[in-house]
Amino acid sequence: MFGKFAIFSLLWILLGNPIAAIVVLIIILYILDRRFVGLSPSVVKPFRRARRIRQLKQQLSLNPNDMSARMELAHLLIERKAYGEARRLLEPAAETMAHSAEYWDDLGTALLFTGSRAEGESAIRRALDINPRVKYGQPYLRLAAVNRDQPEKALKLLDELQAIHSSSCEAYYRMGMIYKALGRREEARRALDEAAALYRTLPRYKRREERPWAIRSRLARLFA
């Protein structure tokens, strides 16, 4: 905190304007967070995604049978939370993409968030049957989050994830939060400690991806 105040004071002196100093300080903190922490969202990614969505829509208008473009477009729409549009793209491709775990996970996600929870869970389970490691275990985390109103079911899903993919700080964090909600505080602390311990063992390239969950775990541990 003192460091931030010192930087702000220096910027105020250099710029001669407290508002400009605050703006510059926010930009500096944002750049540092994006470089070293990763908690704040990218301001560039939505624009890149929007441009790519426009390109893929144009591509599909010329060739509606381009399954690669259809899948990429649906995935980007899911990232944008345009689940209904993604669902309309994916449902007609069920027969063609019947053996694709990525397809069933994306369709399941779109179904989950358009009011078809049972069908969505079934589709994601089908994806995991085809390939339990699809998308590095993210389908398990998605199902656990959707089933947070059924803690025992959510914990079972996270246990399944740990059995096939043990390098996920997010899984331990979510497990800790579920244990905490159940009042099982000791197990919650253990899960959050596991997230921190796991993070320390990860190679550098993997730490960037897992760092936000490791930080969340450390913060949650303070109040567990």
Image (cartoon, rainbow, N blue to C red):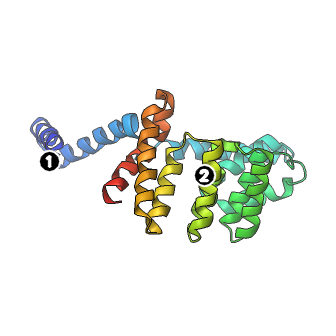
Q: Which amino acid does the dot numbered 2 rest on?
A: Glu
Residue 34 left/right relative to 116: left
Provide residue 124's location: percent of width, then percent of height. Answer: 73, 56
For the residue marked with disc 1, what is the amino acid? Pro
- Tag 2, which secondary structure? helix
Q: Which dot marks residue 73?
A: none
Evaluate whether residue 147 shows in this view. Answer: no
Query: Of 5 and 220, which appears nearest the observer?
Result: 220
Disc count in the image?
2
Q: Nearer the viewer, mark 1 or mark 2?
A: 2
Which mark, by number, is residue 18? 1
- SS class of the residue under badge 1? helix
Numbered mark located on residue 79 in the image: 2
Q: Residue extending furthest top?
A: 204
Name the spot of residue 83 as percent of width and height, x first.
Answer: 66, 61
Whether residue 184 is situated above or below residue 26 in the rendered picture: below
N-term mark: 1 or 2: 1
Name the residue: 33% across, 36% down.
Answer: 32
